[in-house]
Amino acid sequence: MERLSDEQYLRFLVDGFVVIQPATLTETDHDYLYERARDLYGEARESASTTTHLDILGDHLLDQIPELRPLLDDPAVDGALTGILGADYLLHPHSFLHESVPGDQPFHQDGNLPWNERGHYRSHRPDWALIFYYPQAVDEDNGPTEIVPGTQYWTQDFETADRWHAGDRIGRELDLGVLGAPDLEARDALLKQSLATLGIPGLERQFLHVPKGSVVVASYDLMHRGSRTIEDADDRFMFKFYFARTREPAVTEVASLPNLEAVRPEIQPIVRQIWGWSRGTDPDGMAPSVESGEHAGMTLAHDLEAKLLVGREDQKVEASYLLGEMATSDRAAVEVLRRALHDDAESTRRASMYGLRTAGAAAIEVLRDALQAERPSTRRLATAGLGSVAAALDSTAVESLLVAMEEDPDDLVRSNAAYSLGQVVRFDALDPAPVERIAQRLTARLGPDVELDNAFNASLTRSTVRQSVAYALVQLGANHLFTAPQRADLTKICESDDDRYVRGLIAASL
């Protein structure tokens, strides 16, 4: 296994991606996988089915092309994923084969469940990663992927009056149909305009021009898009897989945090916090954050509150993390974050969750109380904030998550609660009794007619809540033992649930 260096890991945290060259695959291997990709698209074009995206191009790639397995097992690829996601990371059952086209994709973040559904709030910590594998060289002619480095820590408002937007396209209020029109200058102008809707200065766009056989390991939340291929260019294919962490980081012997002076100021506190967590030295604010001693006092809390309330997206997130660092020893900072969690602005509420989670034990009461809020989005964020080691050590927080998963009328609250329970059970020092109780109540949510399907696009029905429950059971199975009756119950679910991703995740948990 070829682990990432500290410098590579830092670049991943700062930019949101790292390019890897597989160590064991040859030119012949890449050429073969390119031809197999071309074959699959040929089959898809000849098929009369309306579900070729499911039957041929998505989810069954390893079954149809078992020669992809050595790519995923390659020491350089496996080492990068292990360095980012930890040991025993999970290969998610969803995958897809992309082909470049003459049209342009808009900038977007992939939905955090397959087919642009939403099951939880985005985690700045590396809990998920995408890989893009290119079996051919990619240049300016054959449709390179375009990314916006650093944007994995930001997003745009997604709430609607009763639910949420299905996709996470950037600048969705613009006429994105222009991106398929013949006028290339109009396309380019719209792309520039769409990115400007984020209101974040200094963003830099980067086309990924890479050699044949390259693998890009990217943060799941990095803003990206597929760019157009020019006429007569060779086909460009990209195999996409995604992966999830299943364990909390272990304490490791590593160098101290590198100098961050060259890093964009707004993401420095995020990188600082993730660095400590991913080295197992600072789980959820239970130990002092690196450099947190420099932040103290009512004046600073007041200044950060102003930024959290009326700043740009990047400034709000920065302020929230700084307040989270202060909150371990400053109740004024906790109070600022509490007020922000109930603010009218979605972006302020969303940013506050990251600070409250960073605050660890100091914020548990605030988050638990917010589960009673009238506004669904406040309850959603409260459940997301409770997915932590600090919550795992608080029996009332765990019980609150279980009740929210079972009783809240909002499906994204229930989904976030289940997802957070998965992160709670990653704390492997939990006593067996609460683990067994959590396992029983998670499994009960997968019973017949308990959580009905609530997602119907992409020609298949499924449940975002059941998928989050299944994710939680994967986390539980990776860190604790299922009892024999629990395994029997999960085996039945694996055989009977009509959601293919629930079945795949439960199979992984077993």
Image (spheres, grey):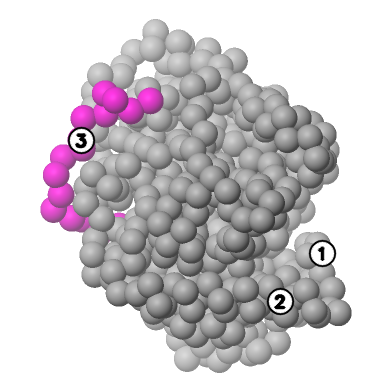
Q: Vertical placement of 30 versus 225: above or below?
A: below
The quadrant where residue 312 appears: top right
Whole-angstrom CA distance, mark 2 to mark 3, is 49 Å
Residue 493: percent from the left, percent from the top? 64, 84
The structure residue drawn at horizontal position 73% and vertical position 70%, both measured from the top left corner, is 53
- Mark 1 or mark 2, earlier in chain: 2
Judging by the rendered image, the residue that carries numbered circle 2 is 42
What is the count of numbered marks?
A: 3
- Mark 2 or mark 3, earlier in chain: 2
Judging by the rendered image, the residue that carries numbered circle 3 is 258
**Residue 376 appears left or right of 65:** right
| Magenta region, residue range | 247-264
The structure residue drawn at horizontal position 15% and vertical position 49%, both measured from the top left corner, is 254
**Residue 335 appears left or right of 224:** left
Judging by the rendered image, the residue that carries numbered circle 1 is 456
The quadrant where residue 49 appears: bottom right
Q: Nearer the viewer, mark 2 or mark 3?
A: 2
How crowded pointer 2 is (Cα within 10 Å; few <14, some 14-19, many 20+) is rated as: few
